[in-house]
Amino acid sequence: MYYVYKHLSKDSEVIYVGQTKDMKNRQSTHKSNSDWRNEIFKIEYAEVTDSMLMDIYEKYYISKYNPKYNKKDIKNEYIRFFTKLEELEFKEYR
């Protein structure tokens, strides 16, 4: 399975958007290696069916939310979406 996830602050601001094939391992890495890990209040994720959709939706949500910790992605000016994709159904990660 493929996942797109969002890290949210206590104010429900999307502070990071990412993608992974292994949610448990990826979130463990964020919690141990991210300078901003203390700002993560909630994690939400959505499942997608393939890696291409995972890439597209990650870039879509980075474009939509402009998260402050996706600096590399914002600086490189990935695709700016002019059409709206069907929204994914996110669930809370525990």
Image (cartoon, grey):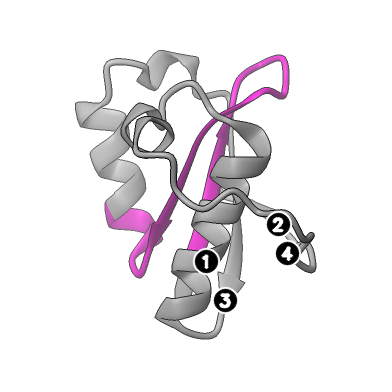
Q: Which mark is residue 17?
A: none
Q: Are marks 3 and 2 in contact (CB under 8 Å)?
A: no
Nearest to viewer (mark 2 / mark 4): 4
The picture places residue 74, in percent across and down from the top left corner, at 43, 33
Residues 66 and 35: in front is 66
Q: CA distance from mark 1 to mark 4?
A: 12 Å
Label 2 CA crowd tier, 10 Å (few <14, some 14–19, many 20+): some
Q: CA distance from mark 2 to mark 4?
A: 6 Å
**Residue under numbered circle 2:** 90
**Residue under numbered circle 3:** 48
Q: CA distance from mark 1 to mark 3?
A: 10 Å
Q: CA distance from mark 1 to mark 2?
A: 16 Å
Chain-order first, disc 3 or disc 2 = 3
The picture places residue 24, in percent across and down from the top left corner, at 35, 56
**Label 4's element?**
loop
Magenta span: 3-25
The picture places residue 79, in percent across and down from the top left corner, at 51, 53
**Residue under numbered circle 4:** 88
Is residue 39 at all visible to an observer of this figure?
Answer: yes
In the picture, residue 37 is in which quadrant? top left
Q: Are marks 3 and 4 in contact (CB under 8 Å)?
A: yes
Chain-order first, disc 1 or disc 3 = 3
Name the residue located 44 percent from the left edge and 66 percent from the top edge.
55
**Residue under numbered circle 1:** 56
